[in-house]
């Protein structure tokens, strides 16, 4: 027992020494600031009460769909998604799995951006519009031809192109630059810093010009335009909120809060045919993150440590639905959805909801009747 105690003691001392060394000698560009998060909403009762509505989801492609962050329904009725290899692939929704291997999804290769395709949506002209975390704002033709549309706005390069939305007439594309300061995939450093390096960009397809609609956003993430086209939403992941920018009407050019104090970290957002918005939350609020909000020095050390270790992710599946006025209409959760979690996009397609993840392989799908 004494030998075991000595070994354990030595391990503890070595670990402590390594932590001190990292804190003293490691560098980071993160310069955290103190902030005060709102008290997290209850998940024991109320509108965000825990449930298991997503438990019936079915996964597919866990063998060969590699961290597919987003999915878009093409004009051909196929599903298009991007992987961590840079590849964008096309999937037949009627053939999601091989008979001999239910977790292998047959697909066709459309293109490889050479970067990291994240959020994507189709343009009325048939091109796939992609927020590529490395390349910027990209379009991909039906033949797989790649064109970089924009890499900067008002002289400031995109650091982390994250998600996209397109106007009904196709003239405008809205892009979230999650953080201009920390290039993909260093998103944790930006969240830890909490200075607000995110932007909402509007790209004009006619003029080829990009302009910044909103800046100083707390990790600008998912983007979606309203069915009426009068406003665009952008998720501020690190602030637990959804911000609305008015495109027309008496508030045109102004912004306000669409939904605040969410129970998780909002990621991508999509609009359905009824004008409702579907928001993915990769994980629930973390008590440690909120506790350290007013301790920037500690968070700076944490930013250094996370260059060597990965922040532990609590397995959980969550998707929220809001109507056009910001009223919660769906609260879908599960400890794991058929083993699937860390959902980064929920996409309504007909009578189904598809789920994607930038952290896990494969996708998941469930019938929308679970919310009726």
Image: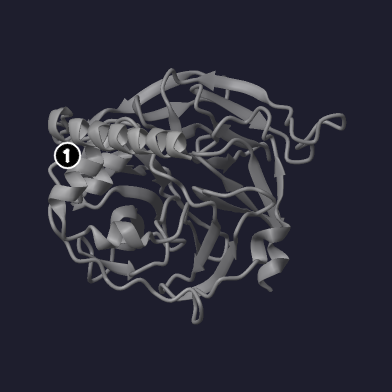
The residue lying toward the viewer, choosing from 73 and 27, is 27
Q: Residue at x 68, y 40 (%)?
A: 77
- Residue topped by disc 1: 30
Q: Residue at x 53, y 49 (%)?
A: 343
Is any atom of residue 28 visible in this view?
yes
Q: Position of residue 103 (x, y in %)?
A: 74, 35
Q: Is residue 357 above or below residue 318?
A: above
Q: Residue furthest front?
A: 2
Q: Residue furthest right?
A: 99
Q: Residue at x 61, y 38 (%)?
A: 74
Q: Position of residue 168 (x, y in %)?
A: 45, 50
Choose top left, top right, bottom left or bottom right for residue 333: bottom right
- Image-based side of 159 in relation to 280, left or right: left
- Mark 1, secondary structure of its residue: loop
Q: Position of residue 114 (x, y in %)?
A: 43, 17
- Image-based side of 128 in relation to 103, left or right: left
Q: How many marks?
A: 1
The residue lying toward the viewer, choosing from 247 and 365, is 365
Q: Position of residue 97 (x, y in %)?
A: 78, 35
Is any atom of residue 205 visible in this view?
no
The residue lying toward the viewer, choosing from 304 and 165, is 304
Q: Residue at x 53, y 29 (%)?
A: 83
Q: For mark 1, does the 10 Å Cα neighbourhood hold few (<14), some (14 to 19), or many (20 or more) residues?
A: many
For the C terminus, give its image quadrant.
Answer: bottom right
Choose top left, top right, bottom left or bottom right for residue 251: bottom left
Q: Residue furthest bottom?
A: 46
The residue lying toward the viewer, choosing from 199 and 185, is 185
């Amino acid at each position: 027992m004494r030998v075991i105690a000595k070994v354990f003691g030595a391990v503890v001392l070595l670990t402590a020494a390594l932590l001190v060394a990292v804190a003293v000698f490691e560098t980071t560009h993160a310069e955290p600031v103190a902030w005060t998060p709102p008290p997290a909403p209850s998940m024991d009762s109320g509108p965000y009460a825990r449930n298991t509505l997503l438990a019936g989801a079915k996964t597919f492609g866990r063998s060969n769909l590699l961290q597919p962050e987003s999915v878009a329904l093409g004009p051909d009725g196929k599903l298009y998604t991007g992987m961590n290899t840079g590849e964008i692939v096309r999937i037949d929704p009627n053939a999601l799995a091989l008979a001999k291997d239910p977790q292998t999804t047959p697909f066709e290769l459309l293109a490889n951006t050479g970067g990291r395709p994240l959020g994507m949506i189709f343009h009325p002209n048939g091109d796939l519009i992609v927020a590529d975390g490395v390349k910027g704002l990209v379009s991909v033709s039906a033949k797989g031809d790649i064109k970089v549309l924009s890499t900067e706005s008002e002289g400031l390069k995109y650091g982390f192109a994250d998600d996209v939305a397109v106007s009904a007439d196709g003239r405008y594309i809205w892009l979230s630059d999650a953080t201009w300061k920390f290039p993909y995939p260093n998103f944790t450093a930006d969240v830890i810093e909490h200075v607000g390096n995110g932007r909402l960009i509007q790209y004009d397809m006619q003029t080829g010009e990009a302009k910044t609609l909103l800046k100083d956003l707390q990790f600008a993430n998912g983007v979606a335009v309203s069915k009426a086209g009068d406003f665009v939403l952008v998720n501020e992941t690190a602030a637990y909120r959804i911000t609305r920018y008015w495109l027309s009407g008496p508030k045109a050019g102004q912004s306000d809060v669409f939904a605040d104090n969410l129970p998780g970290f909002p990621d991508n957002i999509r609009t359905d045919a009824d004008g409702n918005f579907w928001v993915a939350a990769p994980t629930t609020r973390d008590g440690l993150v909120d506790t350290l909000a007013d301790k920037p020095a500690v968070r700076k050390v944490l930013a250094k440590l996370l260059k060597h270790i990965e922040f532990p992710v609590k397995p959980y599946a969550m998707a929220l639905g809001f109507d056009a006025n910001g009223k919660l209409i769906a609260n879908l959760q599960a400890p794991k959805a058929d083993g699937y979690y860390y959902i980064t996009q929920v996409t309504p397609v007909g009578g189904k909801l598809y789920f994607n993840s930038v952290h896990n392989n494969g996708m998941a799908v469930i019938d929308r009747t679970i919310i009726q």
